[in-house]
Amino acid sequence: MPDVMQHADLPHGTIRFMVEGPSDGPPILLIHPLGVSLEFWDGLAGALRDRFKVIRFDLRGHGPNGGPAGDYTIEDLGSDALAVLAAAGVSTAHVVGISIGGLVTMWMGVHARAQVRSLFIAQSAARVGTVERWEERRALVRERGVGAVAELAMGTWFTPEFVQSHPVEANRCRQMIAACPSAGYLGCCAVLRDTDLRSALPGITAPTLVLAGERDPSTPRADAELIVTAIPGARLKTLNSAHMSAIELADDFRNLVVDWVDSAT
């Protein structure tokens, strides 16, 4: 399939997605964090597409197409991911998700077993933060716009030394967040506010790797350990990063993904 931007027409609107790499390569679905777009994965997709069929897409309400106003649910985001797989002509995939993308990955492991070959859950939690935290975030966005949270995110997404030593990479993420449509950001904050998958995790049967950032203030190691304890046979890895090891320690993240998919294929 050509490495060009494609669009899936869904009941709520249009979602962008890309399929890159050999058509017969092991398929990997990448699910990005809150506030960015499929371009978040440019580096990883570029490193994987020689061997793997890489599929990435915009979460509902993210990217230039935007999305509907109102609260979204984890079922909404999971159903979108499955619709993208179908539009890409892929029946099953290894699923890699980070932060809210990891939450969607867990939902797929519970509710879409036939479509999931393995799970790679990075810097996430079965219950992310508190209701109060996400209501405060939504209030800030309503009052001051998504740009107001972009700088706040840098303090949790990356360690201070990474921001200082890699200003281009950090600023690229900051700009993506600032450009996120407010309806999509608010809708996905509702997903984080309302979703609790802790009791559902034992129902996951796919091979699962959970990645924790040792310096992650948003989803600390304890959250990863809870997931690993709940999912039969799940494994835990750690990296010395904050919340976005996919960017901060991109080479290490890529190597973990490659090794994991190779072992689970």
Image: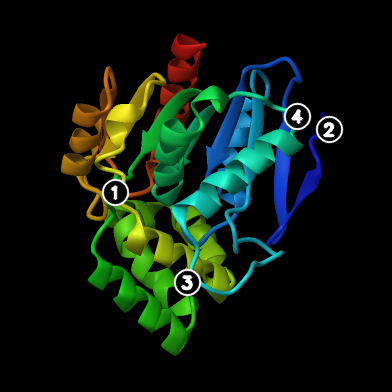
| Residue in view at x 36 percent, y 27 percent | 204
Q: Which residue is mark 3?
A: 186
Considering only order in the chain, which callout, 4 or 1, is on the residue closer to the N terminus? Answer: 4
User: What residue type is disc 3 on?
Assistant: Leu
Does residue 186 appear left or right of residue 89 in this picture?
left
Mark yes or no: residue 247 visible.
no
Number of other residues with Cα within 10 Å of mark 1, as a class: few under 14, some 14 to 19, many 20 or more? many
Q: Which residue is mark 4?
A: 89
Q: Are marks 1 and 3 in contact (CB under 8 Å)?
A: no
Q: What secondary structure is marked by label 1? A: loop
**Figure check: 172 above or below 5:** below
Is residue 119 visible in the rendered structure shown here? yes
Residue type, mark 4 in image:
Gly
Q: Residue 214: x, y in percent?
A: 21, 41
Q: Residue beneath label 1, please?
A: 242
> Spatial distance from mark 2 to mark 3, Cα to Cα?
33 Å
4 or 2: tag closer to the N-terminus: 2
Compute the Cα span from label 1 to label 3: 23 Å
What is the crowding at mark 4: few (fewer than 14 residues within 10 Å), some, or many (at least 20)? few
What residue appears at the point 38 percent right and 35 percent down from the top-left corner? 121
- Could you say which quadrant of the image residue 156 lies in? bottom left
For marks 3 and 4 on the same chain, the one whose residue lies earlier in the sequence: 4
Give the mark nearer the N terminus: 2 vs 3.
2
